[in-house]
């Protein structure tokens, strides 16, 4: 009997209050997937474990409702996708690839563009749960929080009590949340280190957010400076809106800035730095070395072409869909929740290392 979608069931007791499958799993001391298999009498679970879970349910007067058993027989065949901004190159690439792969497996999708406001993100998660999607994919490290305020990701944890959550480009340690992301820390550490080893001493860090991914990149940048005996200077960490001309204009206006290279957390930011260098008649990479991130189309459209970190978006999406299909077909035991993918710098014309 199929187990797809069963993690979004509710279980009702005789007094009319509700308890979700996550609560049953906690009481029984087993995983959500195990409770799902017990409800469907899966042969993958030992008789001893089945008896243990059933006793917990019986002692509390709980039984799966009719809708839950219906899901055990036939899932909704629909996956929710959330991203902050589908016009973003990284997110657009990820969403397009995810949708294509889901269709190959016979699943439809519902896309929600949540923006960055906390209340809107929570609203869309509630909406998708109400649609009874089988799982939810969240594209963007903004959904993983920044690590400073744990309450900002509580809505993700709560959703994971009902359905499997798949987080792309971020990491959140919680049961039923499966993460796949590039190793942004290591990639930025290596890029910064190579710049220093080529004699660069004032490396500007260009960023547009405080998300999980951005924080990892910043830590990689700072660690490289420290390991090479260089100071971490606040005036060389610049947060600016990710608009090419905005970046160019701000760099031109900031005459107090003195830098010989740029590590940007996005290709758009890096192209803005290229336009700044061209406006100042600086030679690239002789006078200024520049790297971007995401290896997007912008990296080969710029002049000169931009060296950019490839954070393996298609590989991450393929892994996410593969793990999702295993979980929706009852193979959760084979799925790793923390999947860190090595990145690779695609060297072009803006670097000399």
Image (spheres, rainbow, N blue to C red):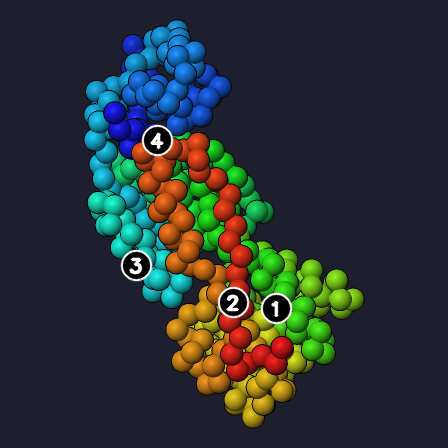
Closest to the camera, between mark 1 and mark 4, is: 4
Q: Are marks 4 and 3 in contact (CB under 8 Å)?
A: no
Up the image or down, 76 lies above or below 111; here it is: above
What element does badge 2 sit on? strand
Residue 327 in view here? yes
- Mark 2 = which residue? 309
Q: Residue at x 51, y 43 (%)?
A: 338
Closest to the camera, between mark 4 and mark 3, is: 4
How far from the left and from the top, in percent, is residue 180? 46, 49
Residue 115 in view here? no
How far from the left and from the top, in percent, is residue 167? 43, 47
Q: Residue at x 43, y 21 (%)?
A: 25
Q: CA distance from mark 3 to mark 2?
A: 20 Å
Q: Are marks 3 and 2 in contact (CB under 8 Å)?
A: no
- Mark 4 = which residue? 330
Q: CA distance from mark 4 to mark 3?
A: 26 Å
């Amino acid at each position: 009997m199929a187990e797809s979608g069963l993690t979004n069931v509710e279980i009702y007791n005789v007094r009319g209050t509700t308890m979700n499958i996550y609560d049953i799993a906690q009481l029984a001391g087993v995983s959500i997937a195990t409770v799902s298999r017990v409800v469907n009498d899966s042969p993958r679970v030992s008789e001893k474990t089945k008896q243990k879970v059933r006793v917990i349910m019986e002692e509390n007067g709980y039984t799966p409702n009719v809708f839950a058993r219906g899901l055990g027989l036939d899932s909704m065949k629909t996956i929710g996708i959330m991203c902050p901004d589908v016009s973003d190159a990284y997110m657009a690439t990820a969403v397009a690839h995810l949708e294509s792969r889901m269709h190959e497996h016979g699943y439809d999708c519902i896309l929600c563009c949540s923006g960055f406001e906390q209340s809107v993100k929570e609203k869309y998660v509630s909406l998708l749960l109400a649609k009874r999607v089988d799982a939810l994919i969240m594209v963007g490290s903004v959904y993983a929080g920044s690590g400073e305020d744990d309450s900002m990701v509580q809505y993700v944890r709560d959703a994971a009590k009902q359905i499997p959550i798949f987080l792309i480009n971020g990491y959140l340690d919680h049961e039923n949340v499966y993460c796949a992301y590039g190793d942004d820390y290591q990639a930025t550490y290596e890029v910064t280190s190579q710049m220093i080893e080529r004699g660069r001493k004032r490396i500007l860090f260009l960023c547009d957010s405080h998300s999980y991914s951005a924080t990892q990149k910043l830590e990689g940048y700072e660690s490289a400076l420290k390991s090479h005996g260089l100071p971490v200077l606040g005036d060389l960490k610049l947060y600016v809106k990710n608009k090419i001309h905005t970046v160019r204009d701000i760099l031109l206006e900031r005459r107090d800035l003195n830098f010989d290279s740029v590590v940007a957390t996005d290709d758009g930011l890096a192209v803005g730095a290229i336009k700044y260098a061209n406006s100042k008649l600086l030679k690239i990479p002789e006078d200024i070395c520049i790297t971007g991130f995401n290896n997007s189309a912008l990296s080969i459209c710029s002049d000169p072409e931009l060296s950019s970190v490839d954070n393996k978006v298609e590989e991450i999406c393929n892994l996410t869909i593969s793990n999702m299909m295993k979980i929706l077909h009852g193979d959760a035991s084979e799925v790793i929740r923390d999947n860190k993918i090595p990145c690779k710098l695609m060297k072009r014309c803006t670097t000399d290392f």
